[in-house]
Image: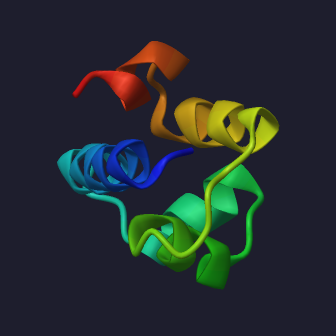
Amino acid sequence: MNSDISKMFATKLQELRLSKNLNKSRLSELAGLDLSYIGKIERCEKSPNLRTIAKLAKALDVPVKDLFDF
């Protein structure tokens, strides 16, 4: 992802996570991802692939498109 999209994705991910009252630890459990990886995505240090994006959407109980609604 380019840096602007990465920043917007990271912001949206964090907004959705907080709106669901989830901390990073709980999201990592629900998505089956490492806690540190969730943090790196939210800090724009890593860009998730499509499979990871799908896992995050499922864990947040939202359609994938909602993660790109920015």
Q: Please identify the quarter of the rendering in which residue 28 is found.
A: bottom right
Q: Position of residue 18 (x, y in %)?
A: 23, 56
Regarding residue 68, the answer to whether it shows in the image is yes
To which quarter of the image does residue 29 belong?
bottom right
x, y percentage for residue 27? 53, 60
Q: Residue at x 55, y 32 (%)?
A: 57
Report the quarter where the C terminus lies.
top left
Q: Nearer the viewer, residue 36 or 10?
A: 10
Q: Is residue 68 left or right of residue 35?
A: left
Count up the numbered dots: 0
6 w.r.t. 34: above or below: above
Q: Is residue 63 visible?
A: no
Q: Is residue 47 above or below residue 12?
A: below
Q: Is residue 49 above or below residue 62?
A: below
Q: In the image, is 48 to the left or to the right of 4?
A: right
Using the image as rendered, state which of residue 3 and residue 31 is in the foreground. Answer: 3
- 20 left or right of 48? left
Where is residue 1? Give x, y as percent: 56, 44
